[in-house]
């Protein structure tokens, strides 16, 4: 891919969690194109290595590393691999996250006749374990990598943590209370951590993507013939630009937030990249 803006990340070590996914793989490739040494962490190590191989094929430096963002020991092991290969982390991108069916209701609204319908998951049937999994994956899966990698970033020039929030953090979508709540926690944590780390020269910001087609949501937003589902239609109707975003359209915001020369006084922000979704009242 060709980055929309070019910043100098030579000799910088970037760690990307969830780097095997659609959005974060685009981030990893952009960072490498700017000269960074990129460590791609993912629970599915084959996906991480595939992205790393693509970067290397295009002349960049990258490694794919297996890591579970919910297990601190796994992250410590991954950190050691990064240290041995590239050195200490300069930039951490917390991209791991996602939703789970057990934290999702069947319908958008509760109707009285739904209460005794065993074929539906209403608010009352939401599985606490499913909700816990979603919350942990998104929030704890941001907190733990920050604990593990930010120690090496203290006092460095240009040290930066970028979290991935969501438009759900501003206004929750129907059906997905666990994911919406978890991303709201990520946004709040971003602000908290930015203040906490402000004396050791680590800036912390977040990007809140609007709607992009990814491996996780593709089956919910597109039919088998490629047409959009009813839910996708509702999303597009609320997005003034009337389309889904492209992964490359997040890259400029990422690079701007990382580049100290461009955004050195930007700290504790959550930047929407949403095609106008958050600005639209629906009328």
Image (cartoon, rainbow, N blue to C red):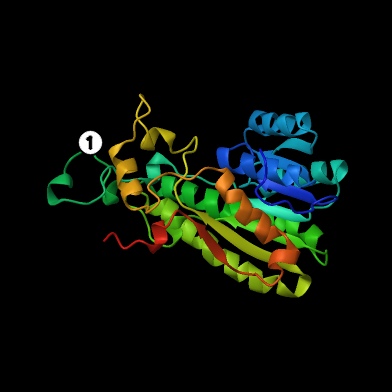
Image mark count = 1
For this orientation, the residue located farthest to the top is: 225
- Quarter of the image that includes the C terminus: bottom left
Quadrant in the rendering for residue 56: top right
Q: Is residue 22 shown to the viewer in this render?
A: yes
The image position of residue 202, as x and y in percent, is 73, 66
- Quarter of the image that includes the N terminus: top right
For this orientation, the residue located farthest to the left is: 113
**186 over 63 or under it: above or below:** below
Query: Nearest the camera: 263 or 149?
Result: 263
Residue at 80 percent across and 34 percent down: it is 59
Query: Nearest the camera: 56 or 279?
Result: 279
Residue count near mark 1 (Cα–Cα under 10 Å), binned few <14, some 14–19, many ≥20: few
Q: Is residue 175 shown to the viewer in this render?
A: no
SS category of the residue bearing label 1: loop
From the image, tell me which residue sits under label 1. 119
The image position of residue 181, as x and y in percent, is 43, 58
**216 over 166 or under it: above or below:** above
Left or right, residue 81 beside residue 164: right
Residue at 70 percent across and 53 percent down: it is 92
The image position of residue 244, as x and y in percent, is 44, 44
Left or right, residue 48 beside residue 283: right
Query: Nearest the camera: 126 or 16?
Result: 16
**176 over 214 or under it: above or below:** below
**37 over 275 or under it: above or below:** above
The image position of residue 34, as x and y in percent, is 76, 47
Left or right, residue 199 beside residue 68: right
Residue at 79 percent across and 60 percent down: it is 153
Left or right, residue 30 beside residue 237: right
Quadrant in the rendering for residue 119: top left
């Amino acid at each position: 891919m060709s980055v929309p803006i070019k910043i100098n990340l030579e000799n910088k070590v970037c760690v990307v969690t969830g780097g095997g996914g659609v959005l974060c793989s685009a981030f990893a490739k952009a960072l490498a194109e700017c000269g960074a040494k990129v460590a791609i962490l993912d629970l599915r190590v084959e996906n991480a290595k595939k992205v790393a191989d693509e970067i290397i094929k295009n002349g960049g430096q990258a490694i794919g590393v297996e890591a579970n963002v919910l297990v601190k020991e796994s992250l410590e092991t991954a950190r050691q691999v990064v240290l041995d290969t590239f050195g200490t982390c300069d930039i951490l991108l917390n991209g791991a996250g996602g939703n789970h069916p057990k934290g999702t209701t069947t319908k958008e609204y509760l109707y009285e006749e739904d209460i005794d319908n065993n074929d539906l998951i209403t608010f009352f049937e939401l599985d606490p374990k499913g909700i816990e999994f979603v919350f942990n994956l998104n929030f704890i899966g941001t907190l733990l990598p920050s604990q593990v990698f930010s120690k090496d970033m203290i006092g460095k020039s240009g040290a930066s943590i970028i979290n991935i929030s969501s438009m759900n953090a501003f206004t929750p979508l129907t059906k997905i209370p666990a994911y919406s709540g978890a991303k709201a926690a990520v946004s709040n944590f971003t602000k908290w951590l930015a203040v906490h780390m402000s004396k050791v020269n680590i800036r912390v910001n977040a990007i809140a993507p609007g709607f992009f087609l990814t491996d996780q949501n593709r089956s919910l937003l597109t039919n088998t013939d490629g047409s959009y589902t009813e839910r996708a239609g509702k999303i597009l109707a609320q997005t003034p630009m009337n389309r889904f975003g492209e992964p490359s359209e997040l890259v400029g915001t990422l690079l701007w937030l990382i580049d100290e020369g461009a955004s050195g006084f930007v700290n504790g922000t959550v930047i929407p990249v949403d095609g106008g979704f958050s600005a639209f009242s629906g009328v």
